[in-house]
């Protein structure tokens, strides 16, 4: 994901479909590594929010055999990423300014770790510019925490001389129906 100021998060929601039966899965262990207490609190809040998508998380000590949520200094322009092979979520606080933006990115990456793919906002959206073969989730189009791009939300400090151009986006930190459908689809498998 990357910063995309030109893109409004509040697009029309996709067509509502009936929710599948509630998922019954074991909690996914996660650990908060290398964060100060303020940011650790944001990770825990994000884990509680991610549970609204139908998957629960349980905090564990930081170690090699658990999903680790790591402090990160991004070198690739992204604010956050999930590395499945390394079992690491990495979030750069500089590229995720403001509480809402950072919580959004934590929830987004936690949903990836739970198996979710990107839910595109509109047909034809490229879900990952650096991986052009990646496809959008088939569950529909619209606002979702799993949208591939995020905006800096309105509680973030201004970053330029034109702060109004950067602000005004409403934080999506609560998973939407599309997120729930995508997590259910991921659980069912291809
Ligand atoms: Zn993503």
Image: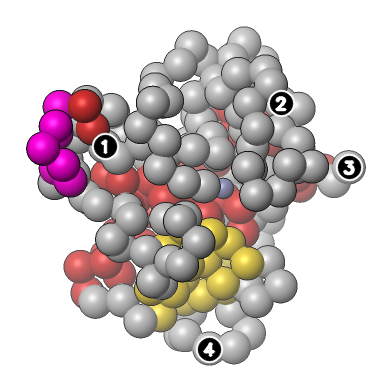
User: From this viewpoint, is residue 56 visible?
Assistant: yes
Extreme left residue here? 161
User: Gap in Å between the C-alphas at discs 2 and 3?
Assistant: 13 Å
In the picture shown, does residue 50 fall above or below 29?
Answer: above
Mark 3, secondary structure of its residue: loop
- In this orientation, which residue lies closer to the viewer: 118 or 139? 118
In the picture shown, does residue 91 fall above or below 64?
Answer: above
Residue located 63% across and 26% down the image: 125
User: Gap in Å between the C-alphas at discs 2 and 1?
Assistant: 26 Å
Q: Left or right: where does residue 8 sit relative to residue 121?
A: left
Residue located 48% across and 12% down the image: 12
Residue located 27% across and 66% down the image: 39
User: Gap in Å between the C-alphas at discs 4 and 1?
Assistant: 32 Å
User: From this viewpoint, is residue 27 visible?
Assistant: no
User: Gap in Å between the C-alphas at discs 2 and 4?
Assistant: 34 Å
User: Gap in Å between the C-alphas at discs 3 and 1?
Assistant: 34 Å
From the viewer's perspective, is the residue at label 2 or at label 1 nearer?
1
Mark number for residue 139? 2
- In this orientation, which residue lies closer to the viewer: 151 or 65? 151
Q: Which residue is mark 3?
A: 190
Mark 4, secondary structure of its residue: loop
Nearest to N terminus: mark 4 or mark 1: 4
Nearest to N terminus: mark 2 or mark 3: 2
Mark 1, secondary structure of its residue: loop
Q: Which residue is mark 1?
A: 153
Q: Magenta residues, as a range?
A: 158-164
- Is the CB of mark 3 within 8 Å of ligand 1? no
Mark number for residue 63? 4
Q: Mark 1 and mark 4 in contact (Cβ < 8 Å)?
A: no
């Amino acid at each position: 994901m990357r910063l995309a100021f030109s893109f409004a998060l509040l697009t029309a929601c996709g067509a509502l479909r009936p929710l599948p039966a509630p998922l019954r899965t074991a909690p996914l262990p996660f650990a908060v590594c290398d964060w100060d207490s303020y940011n650790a609190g944001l990770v825990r809040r994000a884990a509680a929010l991610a549970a609204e998508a139908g998957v629960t998380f349980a905090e564990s000590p930081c170690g090699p055999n658990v999903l680790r949520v790591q402090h990160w200094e991004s070198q690739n322009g992204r604010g956050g990423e999930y590395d499945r092979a390394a079992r690491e979520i990495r979030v750069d606080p500089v590229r995720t300014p403001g509480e809402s933006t950072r919580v959004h990115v934590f929830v987004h990456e936690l949903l990836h770790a739970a198996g979710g793919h990107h839910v595109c906002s509109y047909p034809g959206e490229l879900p990952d510019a650096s991986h052009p073969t990646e496809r959008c989730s088939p569950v529909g189009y619209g606002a979702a925490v799993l949208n591939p791009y995020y905006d800096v939300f309105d509680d973030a400090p201004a970053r330029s001389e034109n702060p109004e151009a950067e602000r005004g986006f409403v934080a999506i930190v609560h998973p939407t129906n599309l997120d729930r459908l995508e997590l259910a689809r991921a659980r069912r498998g291809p």
